[in-house]
């Protein structure tokens, strides 16, 4: 069915207004979808693992190797630069760690390694080229030397090989540009014999602010060289000396890297945590095995104030953009109408 333009428009104004409206709608969609677009892995550079004969799962694209004490091996990756420009890269060996969100991360971290990690990947795997220049539209093979110590423990060592675009002075001055620098990571999983059963230590509770809201953190430690998946964390928070449960929570599908610890969050449902003494009953469950502990923590006035929920102000940018475009359409319409009225009077 055709759209009917009211008769208040001059002859030909309806078609013109249609065109303006279409252009405005396209602009709005471009703005909204452009703002919401999430960039995935870098499309112009790749790193491929050249899998050796001791690869356990040959269908995987990362190194998943069977190892033995005192063995030596050379690992090889291929870097591909599909860009139209040369790139300068710097490489490093990373150690897997557990994030606050309960995920295994292979990127470099400022957090100290867990005390139970005896042989970090970064101490037994060494890149032969830490800084490389990769010309446009070329590939390059990079090697790393793996040396397994005599006293290696049974289980899994987890980490990665990372190459990242080298920072220059302009990048350092522009933090946003630094954050957008391309980084490629290839996972490395070393397997010696059968991994032991996980063992959990529930260490301590703390209070912080995370994602702008108050959070109680529970430090959970995986002391064994095994990967944990589908861990469940249950908590009940009470005031010290009281049986009233202030808040209970359950988080599932938590993953932990071998020999790592993490401050897992309890997101507080009120704007702030009142000053006082608290206890939290913690249960960690993996399969049919669980660990339980009651932790104590204190919130002083300063901590309560510092961790108060910060409410984000409303974002009116999209609405302002829509209003601006509507106003622009109206302005253009009246300019066209005014011009046609002048032409009709001549």
Image (tube, helix red, strand yellow):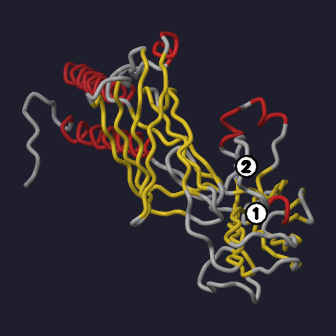
Q: To which quarter of the image does residue 76 belong?
A: bottom right
Q: Which residue is mark 1?
A: 161
Q: Is residue 205 left or right of residue 70?
A: left
Q: Is residue 194 left or right of residue 126?
A: left
Rendered location of residue 159, percent (x, y): 71, 62
Q: Residue furthest bottom?
A: 53
Rendered location of residue 200, percent (x, y): 54, 54
Q: Is residue 185 left or right of residue 345?
A: right
- Can residue 143 be spotted in the picture? no
Q: Residue furthest front?
A: 241
Q: Are marks 2 and 1 in contact (CB under 8 Å)?
A: no
Q: Residues within 10 Å of mark 1 (few under 14, many from 20)?
A: many
In front of the other: 78 or 5:
78
Rendered location of residue 312, percent (x, y): 40, 22
Above or below: residue 241 compared with residue 69: above
Above or below: residue 93 compared with residue 319: below
In front of the other: 17 or 308:
308
- Can residue 211 be spotted in the picture? yes
Q: Which residue is mark 2?
A: 115
**At numbered mark 2, what does the secondary structure look like: helix, strand or loop?**
loop
The residue at the point 9 percent across, 27 percent down is: 8
For discs 2 and 1, the disc positioned in front in the rendered view? 2
């Amino acid at each position: 069915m055709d759209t009917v333009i009211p008769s208040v428009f001059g002859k030909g104004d309806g078609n013109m207004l249609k065109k303006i409206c279409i252009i405005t709608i396209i602009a709005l969609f471009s703005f909204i979808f452009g703002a919401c677009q999430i960039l995935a892995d870098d499309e112009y550079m790749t790193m491929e693992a050249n899998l050796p004969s001791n690869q356990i799962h040959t269908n995987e694209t990362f190194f998943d190797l069977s190892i033995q004490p005192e063995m030596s091996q050379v690992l090889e990756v291929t870097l591909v630069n599909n860009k139209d420009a040369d790139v300068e890269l710097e490489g490093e060996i990373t150690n897997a760690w557990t994030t606050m969100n309960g995920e295994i991360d292979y990127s470099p971290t400022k957090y100290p390694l867990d005390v139970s990690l005896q042989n970090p990947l970064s101490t037994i795997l060494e890149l032969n080229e830490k800084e490389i220049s990769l010309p446009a539209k070329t590939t390059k093979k990079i090697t790393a030397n793996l040396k397994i110590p005599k006293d290696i423990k049974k289980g899994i060592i987890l980490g990665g090989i990372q190459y990242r675009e080298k920072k220059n002075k302009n990048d350092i001055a522009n933090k946003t540009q630094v954050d957008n620098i391309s980084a490629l990571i290839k996972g490395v999983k070393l397997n010696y014999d059968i991994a032991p059963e996980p063992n959990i230590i529930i260490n301590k509770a703390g209070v912080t602010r995370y994602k702008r809201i108050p959070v109680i953190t529970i430090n959970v430690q995986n002391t064994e060289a095994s990967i944990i998946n589908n861990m469940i964390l249950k908590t009940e928070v009470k005031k010290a000396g009281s049986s009233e449960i202030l808040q209970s929570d359950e988080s599932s599908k938590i993953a932990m890297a071998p020999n790592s610890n993490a401050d897992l969050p309890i997101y507080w449902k009120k704007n702030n945590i009142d000053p006082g003494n608290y206890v939290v009953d913690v249960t960690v469950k993996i399969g049919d095995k669980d660990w339980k502990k009651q932790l104590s923590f204190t919130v002083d006035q300063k901590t309560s104030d510092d961790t108060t929920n910060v409410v984000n102000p409303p974002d009116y940018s999209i609405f302002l953009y829509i209003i601006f475009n509507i106003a622009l359409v109206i302005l253009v319409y009246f300019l066209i109408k005014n011009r046609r009225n002048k032409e009709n009077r001549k």
